Amino acid sequence: MLVRQADALILDVVDLHEKDRIVAFLTAEFGQKRGVARSARTKFSRFAGQLQPLAKVRAEWSEKEGRDLVRIRDAQLIRPAALMQESLEGILLGTYLAEHMAQFAQEDEPSSHLYRLLDSTLEAMQAGVDPDLAARYLEIWVLRLTGILPVPRECPICGSPLGRRAALLENDGAIVGMECAEGQTWTPVTEGQLELLRRSGRLSLPDLAQDSPSTDTLRRTEDLCKKVRRNFLQAELRSYRVMKETLSG
């Protein structure tokens, strides 16, 4: 039996039987893990209040060869996720951010970049950064870290620098120059979107928030990331659909 410890971000918690819970969590060193927290639902459980989605904990778990689920031995709270639990909007957004990591982080493979991205995003939101901007920042960086959406500086087809406007190709999610988009189905990418994509690559989230983009730019960038993500996954994240349907309703 192998026993490990690491700081972890809780991604999902699901009830199992009458007393236990299955917990998905993300670490920098070991990537995404899923494990059973025995008796986590009992009144005097040592896990009481620790296993909240997007909480940061110091986790200890044991692994056995050939088993998919680890056994969670302990979880000491480092940072609560109270901000994400205070409203319906916060709960829905938190679920959406967590599903990003669950979808893109690999199991049993180091995920230091994705871990730090989610950790710093949650920390910035706790400090008062606009959740809308924080969500766009995380979307952009998840796609960038996985190689799906590089910083748009030049056209990937002709190599020419992108101008003040560009085009998002619907068939493959690439951002190209206007001339290279001719004859294809595309969506315009505005100067504001290009600037946000570039600034997010060189600024931290708190620094980006000092000169936040317009609401229109944030909405357009949300739509751009949605199209690129859906093109890559060939499906939409369930949490995104639920969030949009619930809030619009």
Image (cartoon, rainbow, N blue to C red):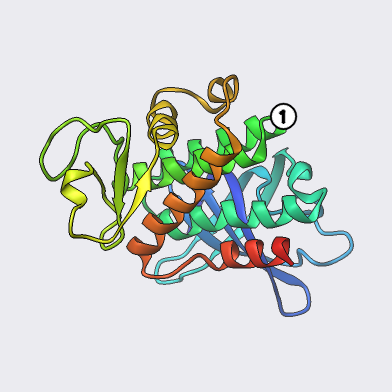
Residue 29 seen anywhere in this rendered image of the structure: no
Residue 94 seen anywhere in this rendered image of the structure: yes
| Percent x, y of residue 142 | 42, 46
Q: Which residue is most to the left?
A: 158
Q: Which residue is mark 1?
A: 128
Q: Which residue is most to the right?
A: 43
Q: Is residue 133 left or right of residue 192?
A: right
Q: Nearer the viewer, residue 158 or 148?
A: 158
Q: Quadrant of residue 242?
A: bottom right
Q: Is residue 160 left or right of residue 140?
A: left
What residue sits 74% from the left and 41% below the top?
80
What residue sits 59% from the left and 38% below the top?
134
Number of disc labels: 1
| Percent x, y of residue 238 | 55, 68
What residue sits 67% from the left and 34% below the top?
130
Q: Nearer the viewer, residue 158 or 179?
A: 179
Q: Secondary structure at mark 1?
A: loop
Label 1 neighbour load within 10 Å: few <14, some 14-19, many 20+: few
| Percent x, y of residue 58 | 63, 41
Q: Quadrant of the C terminus?
A: bottom right
What residue sits 20% from the left and 34% below the top?
154
Q: Quadrant of residue 200?
A: top left
Q: Which residue is most to the bottom?
A: 17
Q: Nearer the viewer, residue 82 or 237?
A: 237
| Percent x, y of residue 41 | 80, 67
Residue 195 versus residue 84 in the image, above or below: above
Amino acid carrying mark 1 in the image: Gly
Residue 200 versus residue 48 in the image, above or below: above
